[in-house]
Image (cartoon, grey):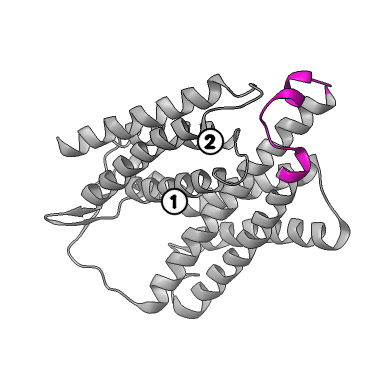
């Protein structure tokens, strides 16, 4: 009952925050930062309590894909909300809040009970998992900035006066933040893969080879785009599309096989 209540509270306030931001998306003064922070903070706290009660159970730790996805989503929401306090992120907020609302509600209906009686804590494994989570979150946020860049650029090319008068951030600011995040995320992903090669013995085992190959493919795209921008000044729509493609491949690597096994095939 507690988990259901926390889920409803989190999703409700995520929806309220999303609705508030969207209602003033093209307003010159933009959404009220104070109200947005209040609504999102309540949602974030409820989301955190939901995570704690979902993962740490009396009969063990539930580390199913749903809870891992909830954790990843929570980190992204906290990061984007924090960034929005200093830099304009008007387009990003309804995306992350809306997705968080959908995911928290969906967690009630997707079966997830992968219980571990104890967790074997190894420094190498913890390092790899931490770097992987950080890399994924940063790169997903970079992808969201890419979507924001594409949206603003497209509206400007159409000479849409509403976009000029709105509270949305300047295109050059969005682009600069996009490439900063892309560079940081690519560096973290590089370290995550290297730590996996050093500390994990089964990265190329049969059951994990698809995850490793997909992760390397995503890294190759991210690294190529990052180096291309730094050395040759690559920018614009092709770069954004490449970043979105790489983010999709990385998502498949992180969550694809586990989703099939745990949700579709019910292999708990």
Mark 2 closeness class: few <14, some 14–19, many ≥20 residues within 10 Å: many
Q: In terms of secondary structure, where does tag 1 sit?
A: helix
Q: Residues within 10 Å of mark 1 (few under 14, many from 20)?
A: some
Looking at the rendered structure, which numbered label has been put on residue 118? Answer: none
Q: Is residue 198 left or right of residue 182?
A: left
Q: Is residue 97 left or right of residue 158?
A: left
Residue 53 at x, y = what percent?
A: 21, 48
> What residue is rendered at 59% in x and 45% in y?
248
Mark 2–mark 1 CB contact (< 8 Å): no
Task: Name which of mark 2 and mark 1 comes first in the sequence.
Answer: 1
Q: Residue at x 79, y 20 (%)?
A: 160
Residue 176 relative to residue 252: left or right: right
Picture quarter containing residue 88? top right
**Place of residue 115 in the rendered image (x, y in percent of width and height, measured from the top left):** 21, 55
Q: Is residue 169 magenta?
A: yes
Q: Measured along the vertical axis of the image, is residue 38 above or below residue 157? A: below
In the rendered image, the quadrant that contains the N terminus is top left
Q: Position of residue 240 (x, y in %)?
A: 73, 43
Q: Please report the bounds of the magenta region as a residue range.
A: 158-173
Residue 189 against residue 143 in the figure, above or below:
below
Q: Which mark, residue 93?
A: 2
The residue labelled by disc 1 is 75
Please say whether residue 240 is visible from this viewpoint. yes
Distance between mark 2 and mark 1 Cα atoms: 13 Å
Name the residue at 45% across, 47% down.
78
Q: State yes or no: residue 200 in magenta.
A: no
């Amino acid at each position: 009952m507690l988990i259901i209540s926390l889920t409803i509270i989190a999703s409700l306030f995520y929806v309220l925050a999303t609705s508030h931001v969207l209602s003033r998306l093209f307003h010159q003064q933009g959404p009220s930062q104070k109200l947005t922070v209040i609504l999102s903070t309540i949602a974030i706290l409820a989301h955190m309590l939901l995570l704690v009660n979902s993962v740490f159970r009396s009969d063990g730790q539930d580390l199913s894909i749903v809870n891992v996805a909830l954790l990843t989503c929570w980190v992204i929401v906290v990061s984007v909300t924090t960034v929005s306090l200093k830099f304009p992120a008007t387009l990003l907020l309804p995306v992350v809040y809306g997705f968080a609302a959908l995911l928290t509600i969906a967690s009630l209906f997707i079966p997830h009970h992968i219980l571990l009686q104890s967790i074997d804590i190894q420094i190498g494994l913890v390092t790899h998992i931490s770097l992987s989570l950080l890399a994924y979150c940063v790169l997903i946020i970079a992808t969201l900035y890419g979507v924001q860049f594409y949206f603003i650029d497209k509206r400007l090319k159409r000479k849409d006066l509403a976009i000029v008068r709105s509270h949305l951030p300047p295109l050059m600011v969005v682009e600069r933040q996009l490439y900063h995040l892309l560079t940081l995320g690519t560096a973290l992903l590089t370290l995550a893969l290297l730590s996996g090669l050093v500390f994990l013995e089964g990265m190329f085992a049969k059951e994990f080879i698809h995850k490793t190959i997909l992760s390397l493919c995503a890294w190759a795209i991210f690294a190529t785009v990052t180096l291309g921008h730094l050395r040759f000044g690559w920018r614009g729509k092709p770069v954004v599309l490449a970043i979105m493609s790489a983010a999709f491949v990385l998502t498949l690597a992180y969550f694809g096989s586990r989703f099939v096994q745990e949700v579709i095939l019910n292999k708990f």
